Amino acid sequence: MLVKWIVALLVPLVVFTFVWAGEGIINNALLGLLFGVKTEYESTTLIFAAIFTIVFYATMLGLVGYMVAADSGQRSMYSLWLDIAIFVLVPLLLIITNGLVLGLSLSVIAWVIYFLIRNRILKSRSEVVSPLPSVSALDEMQRLSLVHRARLAGFWFAVIFAVIALVADIIFLLTGDLPADLLIWVVARTLVLPVAGYLLGQLGGRFALRFALSPKDEESGVKKEQQLEVLSRTRVREEAKDLVPNALPLRSTGAQRFYVLLLTAFLLFYPFIDRFLFGVGTEGRLASYGDAGYYVILALGLNIVVGFAGLLDLGYVAFFAIGAYLWGLVGSIQFQVLTGIHMDLTLTSWLFWPLLIVAALITALFGVLLGAPTLRLKGDYLAIVTLGFGEIVPVVLLELDKYTNGTNGLIGIRKPAFPGADWTTSLPFYYLILALIVLVVFANIRLRDSRLGRAWVAIREDEIAASSSGINLVNTKLFAFAAGAFFSGIAGVYHAAKLGSISPDMFSFGDSVIYLAMVVIGGIGSIPGVIVGALVVYALNQFVIAQLDTFATDPTSFINPIYTFIVKYVPGFTFGNIRNLLFGIILVLVMIFRPEGFIPSARRRRELHKVDAATEEVPIDALDANPGTSEFESSVQVE
């Protein structure tokens, strides 16, 4: 067990530390902050980079303790190592060689291919549904044993990593790549790491015990096994997947807490470690991540309309345009031209924050205005009406040149104001879009789990049944259009402020198709899937397809022979001319091999994958007697 998890987690950590930038971050932070050596990085950058490394390595030590404590040992060592290689090592290497966004997007594609191959292999074996998982409770001795095992895992994980780091540093010292000032750190790290691993491994083990099955429920006093026996097989699996010990601890809720901690630390400190990871060009990368961020917000907003409520919207770009122009009219010189009111530029910038909400509310009102005439429409007819709305809005913005400057658009749009922030750089916009995404995701989760969210799902599945259940179809649909438009308006305001200029030709039907593709490719109705879909589509559209001509003309590129062959018979050919065709082919391939999307919701997965009657999961307490009979009354305990 120890070897299984130590190797699984140690290899990615060694790759990050010595192949990528982990060692560089640590050494620069120590030299600049503790030894007073002048480096190429600012002190603020070094401080935040140091905080990130502390959080990162401490979390890894706690994670190995949790995994060893939570693992039941049912899964083979090599199967685990294969998953770690596909889901951790491959993305790590792709990000190192291709950058963050493109590397993650290529990783998602690699994961999909891996899932397809693995599922076909499993189907070829004709494996049946596994029996119900073990749900036995742990006694006190078993709990102490798990903590002890986690403590050993953390200790030996840290010892092995410390030895590897010591050997690497000795080599670097002999080759002149390690400053002599850091010898004190090398010795201290070698001594401190095992102690930290021991303590953090124990902490990870105790955290795992929070998910262990208690002998009795604290409130009812009933054994947990008895509670689970009355649930369906699916519900038992759902309950048991988070219990400790677990056959798949990588997917458990406890492990997800560690992932969230790592992701949060990475996102918060990313602007300060970007240069360590990818070299020069931080400003441009942060700007591109800001663009990817508003794609995520647009996809989440459209997911409410299409994914939750099942209303096909092909004119979603119109709300994006309305939000952008609302801030553009207020935040530019056009406001003074139209009203004659002279406003201080600093005050105008501060108006961004209230206008962010006001513009979103006005955009939501336009969503209601669109939804009202389409209440009786669905399917293709609804799509045609929304498509028309999406085409009308840019034309109206173009023709109202007295207010919008027509084809010239609005320029000189003010950026937000915030104490201590320099909005001429991309750093404040990075944190702004990060905060907006967090708020939008939180709102989406709350809406999905609310009474309104369940009403949307009911309408999507069957409007007649939903209406018969007492759901107000009119209000529910209007709320869906309004909520989707609200988030699109937020993205529009952000985009206008970041770009500084907008024009009607920036909002076209093609953009609506791109936004819809994000939802479909990621997984309709799935919030994590939609986020992944937005990032993948953005990377494909902006990095891969847009730069194919650059790759093709490079003699070292693998597509250069293909490009040369095509140009030989089609002079003047460029991949830019068939950009939409290539994007369409990618969409078709995804829909053929992964119709439910990259990360589908559970309902969507069940809809698109038929369950064999022999292996269909039937509730344990399914009725064996006909309703109305005495056997039925006794089985359901009718008094």
Image (cartoon, rainbow, N blue to C red):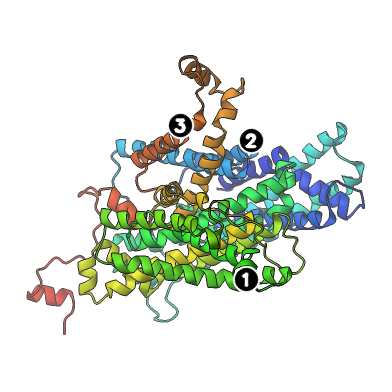
Percent position (x, y) of residue 288? 62, 48
Task: Read off the residue under disc 3.
Answer: 578
Q: Amino acid at mark 1?
A: Trp
Task: Read off the residue under disc 2.
Answer: 97
Q: Is residue 353 above or below residue 112?
A: below
**What is the spatial separation of the Cα atoms under label 1 and label 3, in whole angstroms?**
41 Å
Percent position (x, y) of residue 539? 54, 43
* Residue reaching furthest to the left: 629
- Looking at the figure, which quarter contains the C terminus? bottom left
**What is the spatial separation of the Cα atoms under label 3 and label 2, in whole angstroms?**
27 Å
At x 40%, y 35%, the residue is 585
**What is the spatial separation of the Cα atoms under label 2 and label 1, in whole angstroms?**
39 Å
Q: Residues within 10 Å of mark 1 (few under 14, many from 20)?
A: few
Q: Is residue 324 visible?
A: no
Image position of 136 (left or right of 502): left
Q: Quadrant of residue 388?
A: bottom left
In contact (CB < 8 Å): disc 3 and disc 2:
no
At x 48%, y 38%, the residue is 110
